[in-house]
Image (cartoon, grey):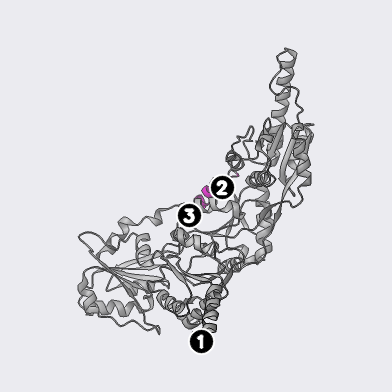
Amino acid sequence: MNMQEKGQDERQSERTVNRGKVWLVGAGPGDAGLLTLRGREVLEKAQSVVYDALVGDGILGWIPEGAEQIYVGKRGGSHTKSQEEINQILVEEAEKGRRVVRLKGGDPFVFGRGSEEALVLQEHGIPFEVVCGVTSAVAVPAACGIPVTHRGMAPSFHVITGHRKNGEPAHMDYSALAREGGTLIFLMGVTSAETICRGLIEGGMDRHTPAALLEKGTTAGQRRVLSTLERLWEDGKSQNIKPPAIIVVGEVCSLSESLQWMEEKPLFGAKILVTRPKRRSAGMAGRLREAGAEVVELPAAEPRLLEDTSFLDRTLERLADFKWAVFTSPSGVELFFEYLRREKKDIRLLMGLKFAVIGAGTAKALCRYGFYADYMPENFYAKELGRGLAETILHEMKEEEKRGENGRGGAGCGKPVKVLLLRAQKASPALCEELARAEIPFEDAVLYRTEFPAPSMQAERVKILLEKKAFDYVTFTSESTVKGFLELLSPTDEELCGFTAVCIGEMTEKAAREAGMRTVTSEVPSMDSMAECMISLQSVRA
């Protein structure tokens, strides 16, 4: 090997070492729940994400903070980037040494041009991986109650693109398709619906064959038009069906009314924005998705453990002074135990303490660490917590006095009754006021503060959805989430009137109402009650 060849090999080796990797990830048909486990795993580790228009809004909220996000959407003949430009972006991002996710609607290898991108990556020596997605060709009909195969009715199914590279109707052998006897599924064929239907009839297919146009399947915008091959395009036009939509032709379409299940869900058709802190949003989002809603997450406030915990350190050194510890939020519980782990403090320090919590969610969070709440008010408000805890403590003191008079003592006899409040920097004064009124000694230990997120791509996307009045409901679980929502999105008065704000309690509802929102308050301050509130509202709208 001569010196020139050796130098070329070394440069090639250096480029290979510095190169990143590209994952071609199928995002599915739109429903965030249909993104595969592998797809989400890869997405949450991405450093660059190149995404399409057909990726579900809920999925885009899972892109990690700090990842570069590049939109290259194509819809209705309007392209932000040509395919050649997209290919170049993938190469350039990978050559920066990054983990690049190419996020595509459906499956990357089913009319997704993923193979074209893979070939370009191969030519440039860039490693890639294909993460299959749930194709809309199967998922959207299923969401509308249409199986693509059915014994005795459709022994096969065929997936066909509805248009060519230049956007014109695709050339098809309609006679051959008419003879197949299986289900025909046309992707990206709405604008060519008349041509396709006429072609199949002229090719010999019975004009009365059941057919369907399915719009925005698996999302809140899902609509279905059931018709016959002869009338499908006219019925679709009268219903103003728009892309993205697919055409299904075959006897299986006749099963739709019997097998449709998605529309039976109580929150079907509802698009909901969840503003809860990131560490707490998954549970609520999951409840709403299970009920049939399309959910978009935008954390509008984040609890953060204080950097300076010296006061907390000193407080824990004299933990024996306290008989009760009080938590007023699930985040407070989680951050407190996170602090204990970080400082390598043994939980046996807490032995002998009693715990009071503001509500069921906080009690559940405490239970995960092996502790059960000794007191929880019936109504989950700070004032009720303070009043009820004071009454409980005064009752215990009287009982201990009785035992002392009878010479029996007691397990807690002699220990001072002092309460430690572990909560946020700016918390409701009502709790302290009730304890002070009952002359119960307490210390208010600031455990965490609430931070409001900086502007982000997700916030920009949500802002666009607000402008389009795409949300039916926006959930608020604290005054902080209302404040963060307003600061992050700066919504106009018109945008604030475009949805119903579902609030967890009176103070949260007051903050939202004063901002100009149309508000409702859940019957009980809990996630389940908020979900029930939206289900009730949706049933009236249906």
Q: Which mark is residue 107?
A: none
Magenta stretch: helix, strand or loop mostly: helix
Assess whether residue 528 is covered by the magenta stretch.
yes
On the image, the x and y values in percent for residue 229 come to 27, 72
On the image, the x and y values in percent for residue 341 come to 65, 45
* Magenta highlight range: 525-537
Q: Quadrant of residue 451?
A: bottom right
- Which sits earlier in the primary sequence, circle 2 or circle 3? 3
Tell me the distance, in whole angstroms, between the alpha carbons under discs 1 and 2. Answer: 71 Å
Q: Residue furthest front?
A: 1
In the picture shown, does residue 22 fall above or below 388? below
Tell me the distance, in whole angstroms, between the alpha carbons under discs 2 and 3. Answer: 13 Å
Assess whether residue 64 is covered by the magenta stretch.
no
In the picture shown, does residue 37 fall above or below 324? below
Q: Which mark is residue 289?
A: 3
In the rendered image, which residue does mark 1 sit on? 2
Tell me the distance, in whole angstroms, between the alpha carbons under discs 1 and 3. Answer: 64 Å
Q: Which mark is residue 527?
A: 2
Residue type at tag 1: Asn
